[in-house]
Image: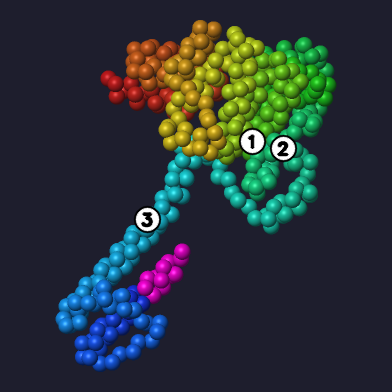
Amino acid sequence: MPHSTNKELIFGIMAGTTGISLLLLWYHKARKSRTALNLPKFLSLGSKFDAMTFQDETYNGRGTVAIFQGRQLQILEKLNELLTNMEELKEEIRVLKEIVPKLEEYIQGELGGKITVHRISPQHRARKRRLATVQSPTTGNSSEEAESEGGYITANTDTEEQSFPVPKAFNTHIEELHLDVLLQKVDNLRMNESSKMESFELLCDHKEKFRDEIEFIWRFARAYGDMYELSTNAQEKKHYANIGKTLGEKAITRAPMNGHCHLWYAVLCGYVSEFEGLQNKINYGHRFKEHLDKAIQFLPEEPFLYYLKGRYCYTVSKLSWIEKKMAATLFGKIPSSTVEEALQNFLKVEELHPGFSKSNYLFLAKCYIDLEQTDDAVKFCNLAVLLPCVTKEVSPNRDGEGCYFHQYFSSSR
């Protein structure tokens, strides 16, 4: 009920109560002075009312006034209490209106929702459709934004039916290579961080010739993941991630028993999730875990898979209670994990490939710190310092890891 309506109702009750009290006082005053009083029929209180309430008050005018004043005070007290409660309720509603938006922002920030989902008007959608009809093909098949049925802006991922949405050949003169030779050369180039761009270009040059070869497709998806890592522009990253994910989908559809296809599809799902809202992030998280487990099933000796699973388990183990509760409320049950599970995966990496990466050592140290096993944490931290940086993803300063350990061990001394 609106606030103005509440006030009108209360004032009406007060006015009615006061009027009735005045009429009753007038009635008894007239009886006391033995003056004939004929009330209208609709105001008659009846003989029973006189007998029960006013039987002993006819000869005591002051007592009668006191009784009615007492009843009037009781009614006024009730009304005052009602007004007070309504004011308190108004204040609580006002406070809630201020707190709820802040709580939503906090929860979204804690859950990693970096991209705000905006509601757009029908006019905006119509304008967007008109613009889409005049855009060039090179712009349309990238990861531009599309709209869901609810009117939200979402990332558009290319469908499986589309042909490879890749740039034209980088080189004017293309050296034709056999598939085996090409794949070997691509793998060798990728081992060097500075040659990943050349590896990507080489795959682009041969995309038409080997577009249906599974070994070519998953490497092409991997190369788009490399370009995502090399790029510093957000739009370029989004472009590479979406195209790579499309290639990954094509790969796992055509070769569901190939572990490399599942591996790089999972990785690219993780990249795409960086540009999605909270709900899609969680959905991509489920997809990442699903295909990572499949990849481990087909490639049980691949250390990189256990490193990725360790990162996943560690991240899930660090979700706060409110993050888990909010995600479960909005999107259903979410996966659970522990620091111990993450530690076992990082140790598996070291078992399969000692000195695999600086980042793996740092996460081993983090796990031991969380488990309060300082000696082991110091051991792996020292090993991380001694290991040279090979690629961007194992840099010691990424995500503030180097600073984190420096501060921790400085405070422990």
Depth check: give the residue in front, 28 or 10.
28
Q: How many labels sit on residues?
A: 3
Q: Quadrant of residue 82?
A: bottom left
Q: CA distance from mark 3 to mark 2?
A: 49 Å
Prevailing SS of the magenta stretch: helix
**Mark 3 or mark 1, which has the lower sequence index?**
3
Depth check: give the residue in front, 190 or 162.
162
Query: For this view, does 208 lie left or right of residue 28?
Result: right
Residue on which the image places disc 1: 238
State the residue at coordinates (68%, 55%). 122
What secondary structure is marked by label 1? helix
State the residue at coordinates (74%, 50%). 129
**Mark 2 or mark 1, which has the lower sequence index?**
2
Q: Over which residues does the magenta segment extend?
A: 1-13
Q: Residue 231 lies in magenta, yes or no?
A: no
Q: Residue 92, which numbered label? A: 3
Which amino acid type is marked by label 2? Ser
Residue on which the image places disc 2: 142
Q: Position of residue 34 (x, y in %)?
A: 22, 91
**Mark 3 or mark 2, which has the lower sequence index?**
3
